[in-house]
Amino acid sequence: MRTVNAVGAAVLCAALGLAGCARSTSGTAVGVEGRTAATSTSAAPEVDADDVRWMDRFCGAGKVLVTAAETMGAPSTSSDPAVLRTEFLDLANRFVGVLDTALGDLRGLLPSPAPEVDPDLEGLVDGLDQARAAIASARDDVQAADPLTVEVYRSAVDRFGTGLRGLNSALTAQDGLDLPDRLVEAGARAKNCSAAASPPTTTR
């Protein structure tokens, strides 16, 4: 069994390059921005306060996911197994913590005010669960390896990358969630769904 050396450090650098996969959302954290509810010449219907609260929580969960995608630090250049082990565990623990928060928030949104949304929301939760499980499994194996070996490290990095891809898929799924007009209208009044809560989009 080999301990981690410069080759192991290169493996982590390659894995951390996957962070770009988890940053693909450049607009809002959820599928509200850019959508327009059906318009008519009649007066706009009264927006249900419960819908506004639900949308605020939904968009808030999306912001937590974006935070997870932005927690990547710079790739390590160390070849010291102890340093690599510590940095990997710190990173994995941050991701697991953020995903636990997002999962708790999203589970609290079920059932939703619009039952037709529930299957997609449940799928989003399942995807995040799988991402969390992959990252937690990688973390636990690295935690148990003392000294850290190249074999354990490579396997952990692979599973961490699987978790990141799952997180990216979840971000994409939430951004594209097909919400009914009444929830889109409620989102326009929810603080967490406002354009100010999102990075500015690029215009050409």
Image (cartoon, rainbow, N blue to C red):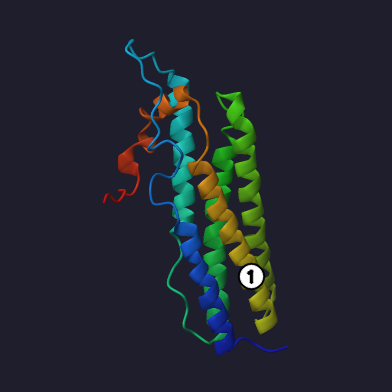
- What residue sits 51% from the left and 49% below the top? 171
In the image shown, does 18 or 56 lie closer to the viewer? 18
The answer to which quarter of the image holds residue 115 is top right
Residue 132 appears in the picture as rendered: yes
Work out whether residue 86 or residue 10 is closer to the camera in this orientation and state it. 10
Image quadrant containing the N terminus: bottom right
Residue 95 point in image, percent of width and height: 54, 59
Tally the marks.
1
Residue farthest toward the front in the current orientation of the protein: 204
Relative to 86, is 182 on the left or the right?
Answer: left
Label 1 environment density (alpha carbons within 10 Å; few <14, some 14–19, many ≥20): some
Residue 100, image x, y percentages: 58, 49
| Residue 151 percent coordinates (x, y) | 69, 81
Q: Residue furthest left?
A: 204
Given residues 134 and 176, the one toward you in this image is: 176
Asked if one can make out residue 147 in the rendered structure from this viewpoint, the answer is no
Residue that extends furthest to the right in the rendered view of this protein: 1
Q: Residue at x 56, y 62 (%)?
A: 93
User: Vertical placement of 41 versus 152: above or below?
Assistant: above
Q: In which image quadrant can residue 110 be found?
A: top right
* Left or right side of 76 for 132: right
> Which residue corresponds to mark 1?
158
Q: Amino acid at mark 1?
A: Asp
Looking at the image, which residue is at 54% across and 40% down? 105
Q: Secondary structure at mark 1?
A: helix
Image coordinates of residue 102 in percent, x first then y, are 54, 46
